[in-house]
């Protein structure tokens, strides 16, 4: 069964450093998303991406965040200058035309 | 008012019990509805979509009441493996794009 994959599974970084989280969506999916979940809190929408551009972003997704689809398979989330409060699980998701989204296993980001 | 509200639980039930989860949503423009399941420190996994006519998948029954903006999930004959957090999720479709809004989840613990 096709699945969304994410790397790395755990990323530890120093405050102020840049991180890139990587995702490989399901191959025939057209829509891509990033969500985050701070420990003990709910899953929050960050951004959606379609046809090589951002279609919607939340208030959380400020200028420190960017997304890119550098080739035909990868979808990345970059945080330019990490803050302590960026520590969270980051989930990538993808979908076909409909709303049902399938999530990757997540990257746990720890900012020290 | 929260966009999606759920009773946080935990619900502690014996094996074989029937358990019901409730959820309300605030945005009447919400278009589609889901239950996701999340195991500890794992990604959300799509359990089932929810339709106004009600739908069933084995031991799981989901119901939607658009007039009351209320969603429910019933689990019959609960198993130890049903222990997880159940996330009520609402899809908002605008400008041609989908965005999932998650509730905080209801924790279920099934014991022998």
Image: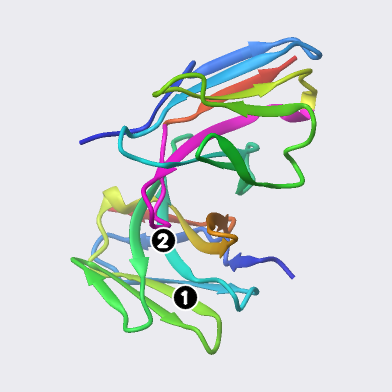
Q: Which residues are magenta?
A: A85-104
The answer to which of A77 and A40 lies nearer the viewer is A77
Q: How far is mark 1 from mark 2, CA to CA?
A: 9 Å
The numbered dot on residue B49 is none
Left or right of B35? Residue B79 is left
Q: Quadrant of residue B100?
A: bottom right
**The magenta stretch spans residue A96:** yes
Query: Quarter holding the N terminus of chain A?
Result: top left
Q: Is residue A63 above or below residue A31?
A: above
Left or right of A15? Residue A35 is left
Q: Quadrant of residue A30?
A: top left
Q: Is residue B104 above or below residue A78?
A: below
Residue A18, x across and y down, in percent: 72, 13
Q: Residue at x 76, y 20 (%)?
A: A82
Q: Which residue is mark 1?
A: B71
Q: Indicate the secondary structure of the residue bearing disc 2.
A: strand
For the residues bearing labels 1 and 2, Cβ distance under 8 angstroms: yes
Residue B5, x across and y down, in percent: 61, 67
Q: Is residue B58 above or below residue A28?
A: below
**The magenta stretch spans residue B44:** no
Q: Residue at x 28, y 48 (%)?
A: B81
Q: Which residue is mark 2?
A: B35
Q: Is residue B6 above or below residue B45?
A: below
Left or right of B49? Residue A1 is left
Q: Residue at x 69, y 11 (%)?
A: A13
């Amino acid at each position: 069964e096709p699945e969304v994959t994410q790397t790395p599974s755990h990323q530890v970084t120093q405050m102020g450093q840049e991180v890139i989280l990587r995702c490989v969506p399901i191959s025939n999916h057209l829509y891509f998303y990033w969500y985050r979940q701070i420990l003990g809190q709910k899953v929050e929408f960050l951004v959606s991406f379609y046809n090589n551009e951002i279609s919607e972003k939340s208030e959380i997704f400020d200028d420190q965040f960017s997304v890119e689809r550098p080739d035909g398979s990868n979808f990345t989330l970059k945080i330019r200058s990490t803050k302590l409060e960026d520590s969270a699980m980051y989930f990538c998701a993808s979908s076909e035309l409909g709303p049902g989204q399938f999530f990757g296993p997540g990257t746990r980001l720890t900012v020290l | 008012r929260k966009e999606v509200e759920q009773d946080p639980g935990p619900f502690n039930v014996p094996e074989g019990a029937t358990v019901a989860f409730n959820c309300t949503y605030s945005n009447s423009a919400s278009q589609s509805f889901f239950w996701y399941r999340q195991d500890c420190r794992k990604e959300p996994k799509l359990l089932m979509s929810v339709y106004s006519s009600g739908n069933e998948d084995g031991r799981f029954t989901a119901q939607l009441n658009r007039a009351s903006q209320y969603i429910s999930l019933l689990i019959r004959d609960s198993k130890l493996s049903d222990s997880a957090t159940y996330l009520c999720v609402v899809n908002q479709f605008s400008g041609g794009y989908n965005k999932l809004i998650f509730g905080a989840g209801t924790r279920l613990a099934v014991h022998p």
